[in-house]
Image (cartoon, rainbow, N blue to C red):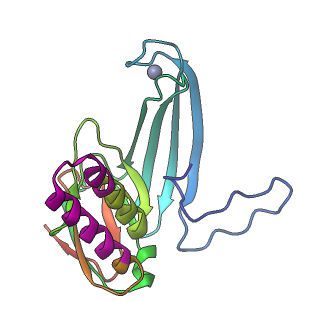
Amino acid sequence: MKHMSPTKKPAKDSAPVPAPKKQEVTKVEGPSYIKGELCPFCNKKTLALMESEMDIPYFGKAYIFSMDCENPECGYHKADVESAEEGRGSAKYTLEIDSEEDMKIRVVKSSSATIKIPHIGSIEPGEAANGYVTNVEGILQRMKKQIERLRDDSEDEDDKKKAKNMLKKLTRVMWGQEKLKITLEDPNGNSAIISPKAVKGK
Ligand SMILES: [Zn+2]
């Protein structure tokens, strides 16, 4: 699943399993699947549930869930990530991105997290929000998609122009040609930016 391990290639069945590297997200348990559950959106028994427990370096153990409706006319999708450690307080992280290397910094983002990029946009929490394990590049790609939608839907030329400039800026940031600050806040503490460069606050 792409949200579980964005950089890992699928292992061949015959190949020996390599020892997990310290930096990699490793599986603790699962994934376990349940199929044929009732979908709350299309009311057909086509919902597939997945749950696994992963060990995320410098974050700890976390549960990763997803729900996918296999009815192609519905396509309901919901995913989330939750820390397996109890009593994690609220989390706030600030990261200054200034190189291409920073694209690889891992980000754990639960459905209760808010990610903000000043003057560009935000990823908001809520019922419809998904949780996932990704990296900075994955967050910027999502932000780009949001802005592309704004650009395509807007009737206003100024808004279109603004969106185009934001997209240019994000591309330059991805190439390490421009700096960018991102903040992540999660009142439930199920999220993190995992890097010594990230400044943690309360
Ligand atoms: Zn459905």
Observer-nearest residue: 191 or 79?
79
The magenta stretch spans residue 159: yes
Relative to residue 154, is residue 12 drawn left or right? right
Please identify the quadrant where the C terminus is shown: bottom left
Observer-nearest residue: 81 or 29?
81
Q: Position of residue 129 (x, y in %)?
A: 29, 42
Q: Position of residue 187 (x, y in %)?
A: 17, 52
**Residue at the image point whose x is 43% and y is 60% from the top:** 134
Numbered range of the magenta stretch: 147-171
Displayed quadrant of residue 41: top left
Q: Position of residue 162 (x, y in %)?
A: 19, 65
Relative to residue 115, is residue 45 drawn left or right? right
The image shows residue 119, relative to residue 195, as above or below, that is: above
**Residue at the image point whose x is 67% and y is 62% from the top:** 9
Relative to residue 144, is residue 163 drawn left or right? left
**Magenta: main secondary structure:** helix
Observer-nearest residue: 30 or 74?
74
Q: Residue furthest right?
A: 14
